[in-house]
Amino acid sequence: MADQPLTSRGAATYQRIIDVATQEFAEHGIAGARVERIVSSARTNKAQLYAYFGSKDGLFDAIFFGSLERIVNVVPIDATDLADWAVRLYDEYLRRPDLIRLATWARLERRPAGHLVDDPDRLDDSKLRAIAEAQAAGRVRQGDPFDIMAMVIAMSMAWSPVSNVYAATAQEPPELHEQRRALLRESVRRAMTADRAQVPPSASDRA
């Protein structure tokens, strides 16, 4: 991206590119996305796009990492209530199914195994610390905090665009979403609430 601050007109063009390219990548993937379609719909040109993002891959990176940050900021974890966190993730996937599709393309075309992004870009340190603290307090079942987080996210995505069973949409009846939220909330609560027999004794208990 250009080093100099953007003018108001440049900022508007930048945002149009981001908005159009998000849908292009979500629909067609990294390899299938076409810069020509993006610049045409964004009412700009290739020179401007490359000045901002360097390449098509650079544009995808800007959008993809922005989507990861959005999830963290819009749906912050509450490790003391992982069931509520899962439901809030469910709702975010309904609002922004394109974000899940971006992650799916990144998995298919870039990282078929292991973590989806490099360690410095994972943005899950705070989540893992929160889960570990909730485990120590006896709120969350024992287990690797990363595996706990991964399982809750997977449960929240049961009806998302990556489901191989059924993908929900925001246009479905509200009562249907409420049924799913209730099932998801109860399932995560049952799966992740600590078994009291697993909880390490506190200092006062050992005294």
Image (cartoon, rainbow, N blue to C red):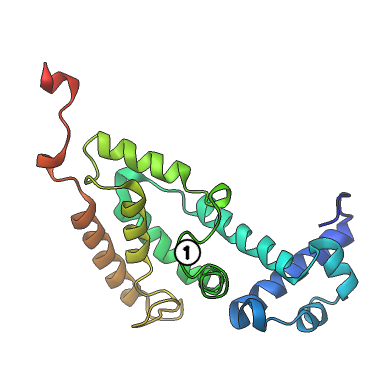
In which quadrant will I find the N terminus? Answer: bottom right
Which x, y percent locates residue 44? 87, 74
Tell me: 138 left or right of 5.
left
Mark 1 crowd level (few <14, some 14–19, many ≥20, 10 Å Cα): some
Tell me: 145 left or right of 68.
left
Residue sitting at x 51%, y 52%: 72
Q: Amino acid at mark 1?
A: Glu
Residue sitting at x 31%, y 43%: 80
Q: Is residue 44 above or below residue 135?
A: below
Q: Residue furthest top?
A: 207
Q: Quadrant of residue 37?
A: bottom right
Which x, y percent locates residue 31? 66, 80
Q: Is residue 168 above or below residue 90?
A: below
Tell me: 2 left or right of 160.
right
Q: 190 and 58: which one is in front?
A: 58
Q: 172 and 1: which one is in front?
A: 1
The number of numbered badges drawn on the structure is 1
Q: Quadrant of residue 197?
A: top left
Tell me: 86 left or right of 190.
right
Which x, y percent locates residue 18? 72, 67
In which quadrant will I find the C terminus? Answer: top left
Residue sitting at x 22%, y 62%: 187
Q: Quadrant of residue 132?
A: top left
Residue sitting at x 38%, y 69%: 157
Q: 134 and 144: which one is in front?
A: 144
Q: 114 and 204: which one is in front?
A: 114
**In the rendered image, which residue does mark 1 sit on?**
92
**Helix, strand or loop for disc 1:** helix
Which x, y percent locates residue 3? 86, 50
